[in-house]
Every structure is written in C-alpha cells, then in structure tokens.
Amino acid sequence: MLNSNSNYIMEPSFVHCENLIEGRLSFRGMNPEIERLLELEQAEKLANTRHEQPTEVSDKDMASFYNAQQVTMQKKFQTKAQFKAKRNNVEKTKWQNKKARFHKPQEDDV
C-alpha cells in the first residue's frame, strides 16, 4: 500500500522475495568466478524443471513422412538426364503392361 505520507510500499506477504537470486552479480567478465557460479546454478535449475514432453506424432508416422520427403527432395535435384531416363523407363513399362488386342485386318491388306 502506498501512503501519501510515505515513499515506501508496504506489502503484507513475502511472495515477491521467494525466487530472488544471490546478491553478488557480475556482468561481461568483471568477476568470472561469480559468473561461473551463476551459470552452474542456472543449469541446475533447468535440469530440475525440465520434463519430458509427450510425443504427438508416432515414430512410424515420422519415418514414413521423412521417407516421402526424401523422395520429393531427390526429384527436386534430379538432372535432366536422370529425369528423362526415369521417364523413358516408366513409358516402356507402361507399353509392356498394355494388353495386345486383336485388330481386324483392313481390306487393303488382303
């Protein structure tokens, strides 16, 4: 509470004082020992608070996704020769898979 007579704030709880850092600080290498201690404390706090997050995507789904991405990237960086060779190979297999049909002889051939 701020009184009109006082320049101080009176707070009835200690909540604001709970997670304060130590009084000794160092900035930009002025006191390397204190900086090292602060880094160790900070790393320790992170290790205590870090928890494992549950996975949203299963490993199978991720593997199939990256496999499809790999094929897409291969297509993107193909050279013209590789692209033409692959296209010709696909056209040949299409032609081989086509079932031969009987064609009625034309009258000119007889």
Image (cartoon, grey):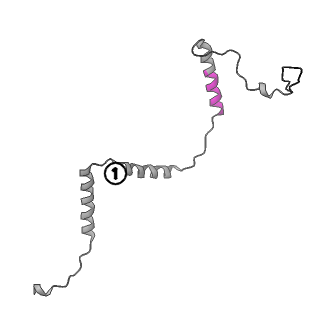
Q: Is residue 12 above or below residue 107?
A: above
Relative depth, front residue between 78 and 41 = 78
**Residue ranking furthest to the front:** 4
Magenta stretch?
A: 39-50
- In the rendered view, does 10 fall on the left or right side of 101? right
Q: Residue 72 at x, y = what percent? A: 38, 51
Q: Quadrant of residue 38?
A: top right
Q: Is residue 40 above or below residue 63?
A: above
Q: Quadrant of residue 91?
A: bottom left
- In the rendered view, does 57 fall on the left or right side of 90? right
- In the rendered view, does 97 fall on the left or right side of 105? right
* Residue indicated by mark 1: 75
Q: Residue 5 at x, y = what percent? A: 89, 20
Q: Residue at x 24, y 68 (%)?
A: 96
Q: Residue 3 at x, y = what percent? A: 88, 24
**Residue ranking furthest to the top:** 30
Q: Residue at x 51, y 49 (%)?
A: 59
Q: Residue 17 at x, y = what percent? A: 77, 24
Q: Residue at x 42, y 50 (%)?
A: 69
Q: Residues within 10 Å of mark 1 (few under 14, many from 20)?
A: few
Secondary structure under the numbered disc 1 in the rendered image: helix
Q: Is residue 66 magenta?
A: no
Quadrant where the C terminus is found in the figure:
bottom left
Q: Quadrant of residue 9?
A: top right
Q: Is residue 12 above or below residue 90?
A: above
Main secondary structure of the magenta stretch: helix
Q: Is residue 49 above or below residue 70?
A: above
Quadrant where the N terminus is found in the figure:
top right
Relative depth, front residue between 26 and 39 = 26
Which amino acid type is marked by label 1?
Answer: Lys
